[in-house]
Image (cartoon, grey):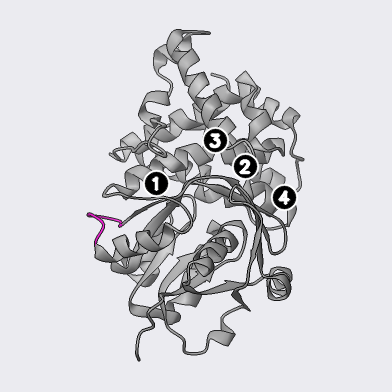
Amino acid sequence: MERREAPRILIMGAGAIGGTVAACLDEVGADVTAVTTNPAIHAAVREKGFRTTGESGERTVAGRIELGTDALESESFDHVLLATQPPQVEEAARTALPFLAPDGLMVCFQNGLCEARIAAIAGADRVVGGIVAWGASMPEPGLYDRTSAGGFTLGRLAGEPDEAVKKLGALLEAVGPVELTDNLMGARWSKLALNCAVSSLGTIAGERLGPLVMVRRYRRLALEIFTEAVEVARAEKVRLEKVSGTLDLDWIALSAADRAASASAGLTAKHALLLAVGLRYRRLRSSMLSAIERGRIPAIDFLNGEVVRYAARHDVKVPVNQRVVDTVNALARRELTPSRELLDRVHEETRA
C-alpha cells in the first residue's frame, strides 16, 4: 500500500488531551482520526468540530472522529497516540494495535509509568513515552480548554531518541515545544512526583490548583508527597530529571533538617518555588476529580498508587501517599465528599 505524504495519526481518546492534540494536528495537515467511546463527545465533534479555547485562543477545527474502532476496518496508521485516562490505556492499546503500521509508534500520553504496560502489549521497540507538560480540560463534550502552555518530553524506554522519535517530535511541535530525552524514566518519575501532589490535592479538595497553593499547609502536604516519591525513585536508582527544565525534585524534596525546622531559609525557598509552579498551573483541574464526578475509576493507582507499589519493593515507608490513595478511593466509592475540610484532615493526620 502506498504511504500518504501526510502522516496518519490515530488518537485513542477524545477527552481534554486527545481533543486538543487532534485539533492542533488537524490544523497542520496531519491525517488525524480520533476515537472515543463517549457518544456525547462523538456527537458534539461530528456536529460542531473540535472547539478549542484558552491559552491558544478560540477556534473550531473540523476533524474526523469515530465512536469506537469498527469504522476503521482495515486502515493503517503511522502513529497511535494513547490519550485515554490511565485505567483505560491498556484496553485502548490492545484495541488500536491491529491498526498500527508495522513500523509505527504507539505513544503514551498518560501520567504515571504506563510505558512498561504498553510495551507488554505492543513491544518495547514500538513504544514511546510522551510526557505532557501542559494542561487542558473539557468543560463540555467537544469543547477543549487549554489551561496552561507547554509541550512534550519524548523518549524511548531505553536509549537515545532515534530518527522515528525525532520525526514524531517535529510533528508534535504543532501542539507545543518538544524536548527529547535519553532518560525517560528520570523524566517520568519527576512528573509522577509532581502529579502525585497537584492532582491528588485538587481531587481531595475539589478545587483548581491555584487557590490551594496559596495555603501554606497544603504546600507542606505537597512537599511531603514529593519527598516520599523522590525517596522511592532513588531506591529504584532512577536519575531524576528537572520537570519542564526548572523544577528540581531532588532539591525540593524535604531533608531531615527541613522536617525538623518550623522555618528556615531552605524551607522558605522550597515553598516559594512550589508556589510559583502552582500559580503557573493555577487553572489546572484534576482529571481524577472529573473522573469521580462522572462515576469513572480515578487514576490514583497510576499516580500515588505507583509510589506505594514501588515503595513496597524496597521497604520504603510512604504513609502520606498511602493516605492519599485511601482517601481518593473513598471519594470514588462516595464514602467521602471532596472539600478543603477533608484535605485539612489528611494534612493533620499525616503530620510526622
Mark toward the start of the polypeptide (1 vs 4):
1
- Identify the secondary structure beneath mark 2: loop
**Amino acid at dot 4:** Arg
Q: Specify the amino acid type for callout 2.
A: Leu
Q: Which mark is residue 188?
A: 1
Q: Earlier in the sequence, mark 2 or mark 4?
A: 2
Tag in front: 2 or 1: 2
Measure the C-alpha gap from mark 3 to mark 2.
13 Å
Dot 2 and dot 4 residues touching (CB under 8 Å): no
Mark 4 highlights which residue? 333
Check residue 261 in the rendering and tell me which mark sits there, or answer none.
none
Q: Residue 329 in the image: state x and y as whole percent.
A: 65, 46
* Mark linked to residue 197: 3
Which numbered marker is on residue 284?
2
Q: Secondary structure at mark 1?
A: helix
Disc 3 + disc 4, Cβ < 8 Å: no
Left or right placement of residue 63 versus residue 90 in this view: right
The residue type indicated by label 3 comes to: Ala
**In the rendered structure, which segment of residues is drawn in magenta?**
156-162
Mark 1 vs mark 4: in front: 1
Along the horizontal axis of the image, is 95 left or right of 238? right
Asked which quadrant contains residue 156, the reply is: bottom left
Label 1 to label 4: alpha-carbon separation: 29 Å
